[in-house]
């Protein structure tokens, strides 16, 4: 299980960032097809409890389809995959120098959205993921879980509601965290809503955005992120588990040249980072905080 202080931080941030993307669920027709993806670079970060440092490059792409039975009821499926490439520098002593390299991820998720009463909506998003180093067993790299939330349209400019996330872990444990779904038009131009995750992230994030004009908007996005992955059978922790936890905070600029296409770029910092290395029995071999690191990247989404 996560350390108690980290769990408190995770729950606090989960209230903000692990929310169901209400606005993204709006349907424009009975069938909606979508393709999205992006990439992010984390600059080299020094390890606080070990020598040296590391950098990360990540990319992810996915495609899916939604079908709307009515304006308030729909189901969908999304398939995706990507990779995170870790580059530990020559001075790194963490896990013997380079405890892992390229981490592959695949994901399949289902979405259900069902209206009830005059203003209520239920969201259910079960998913299955594999996160593992090249050469690691896919069956040992598999986790699954579900987000579920209920939201009410309290006013024309505010939809909000609670929920829960329940996910398995590679160490045969389960994590629970609260979920918040929100879409709030604070004013004509300002909006606070559940945003998208960065790239290959474990969930969406919260975004405060300002609409400059019909095409451009600026925003500030934050989230809590915890990614774990199975290691191969050849490293210092053969068959073990690696984990990377952090809190990214980024400024975003989004362009929507059409109703179907959105493009965004972002830059910011990744705070409160921690790397953890466990062996195949779940024993912690090494753990190290790392310094804040610069982030920059880009994402896209096309719906048709």
Image (cartoon, helix red, strand yellow):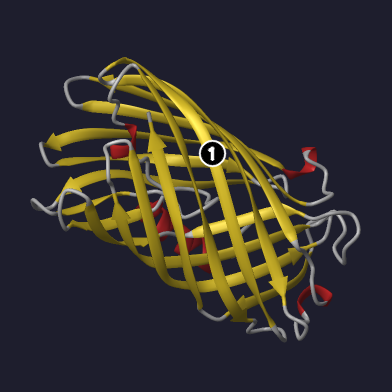
Q: Is residue 238 left or right of residue 172?
A: right
Q: Is residue 58 left or right of residue 110?
A: right
Which image quadrant for residue 280?
A: bottom right
Residue under the point 89% across and 54% down: 233
Residue 258: x percent and y percent?
Answer: 27, 40
Residue 130: x percent and y percent?
Answer: 68, 42
Q: Quadrant of the C terminus?
A: top left
Residue under the point 47% across and 36% down: 35
Q: Is residue 52 visible?
A: yes
Q: Is residue 165 left or right of residue 103?
A: left
Residue 63: x percent and y percent?
Answer: 51, 34
Residue 43 vs 127, above or below: the answer is below
Q: Quadrant of the N terminus?
A: bottom right
| Pointer 1 residue | 62
How busy is the neighbourhood of tag 1: few (under 14 within 10 Å), some, or many (20 plus)? some
Which image quadrant for residue 33?
A: top left
- Please identify the residue farthest to the top as the structure is shown: 69
- Name the one closer to the observer, 234 or 164: 234
- Name the one closer to the observer, 288 or 24: 24
Residue 202: x percent and y percent?
Answer: 53, 49
Q: Secondary structure at mark 1?
A: strand
Residue 150 vs 137, above or below: the answer is above
Number of residue marks: 1
Residue 135 vs 253, above or below: the answer is above
Q: Is residue 22 visible?
A: no
Residue under the point 72% across and 60% down: 242
- Please identify the residue farthest to the front as the structure is shown: 257
């Amino acid at each position: 299980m996560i350390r108690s202080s980290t769990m408190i931080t995770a729950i606090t941030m989960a209230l903000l960032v692990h929310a169901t993307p209400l606005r993204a669920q709006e349907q424009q027709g009975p069938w909606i097809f979508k393709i999205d993806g992006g990439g992010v670079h984390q600059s080299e970060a020094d390890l606080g409890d070990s020598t040296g440092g590391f950098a990360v490059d990540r990319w992810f792409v996915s495609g899916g389809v939604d079908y709307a039975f009515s304006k308030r009821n729909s189901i969908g499926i999304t398939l995706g995959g990507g990779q995170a490439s870790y580059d530990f520098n020559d001075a790194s002593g963490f896990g013997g120098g380079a405890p892992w390299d390229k981490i592959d991820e695949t994901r399949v998720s289902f979405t259900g959205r069902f209206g009830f009463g005059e203003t209520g909506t239920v969201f259910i998003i079960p998913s299955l993921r594999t996160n593992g180093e090249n050469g690691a067993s896919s069956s040992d790299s598999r986790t699954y879980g579900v987000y579920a939330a209920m939201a009410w349209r309290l006013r024309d400019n505010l939809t909000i509601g609670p929920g829960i996330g329940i996910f398995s872990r590679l160490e045969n444990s389960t994590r629970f965290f609260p979920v918040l779904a929100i879409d709030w038009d604070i004013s004509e131009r300002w909006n606070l809503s559940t945003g998208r995750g960065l790239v290959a992230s474990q969930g969406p994030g919260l975004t405060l955005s300002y609409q400059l004009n019909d095409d451009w908007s600026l925003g500030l996005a934050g989230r809590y992120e915890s990614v774990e992955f199975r290691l191969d059978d050849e490293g210092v922790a053969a068959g073990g588990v690696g984990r990377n936890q952090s809190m990214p905070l980024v400024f975003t600029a989004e362009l929507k040249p059409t109703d179907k296409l959105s493009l965004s770029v972002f830059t910011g910092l990744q705070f409160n980072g921690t790397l953890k290395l466990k062996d195949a029995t779940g024993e912690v071999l090494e753990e190290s905080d790392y310094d804040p690191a610069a982030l920059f990247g880009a994402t896209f989404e096309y719906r048709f």
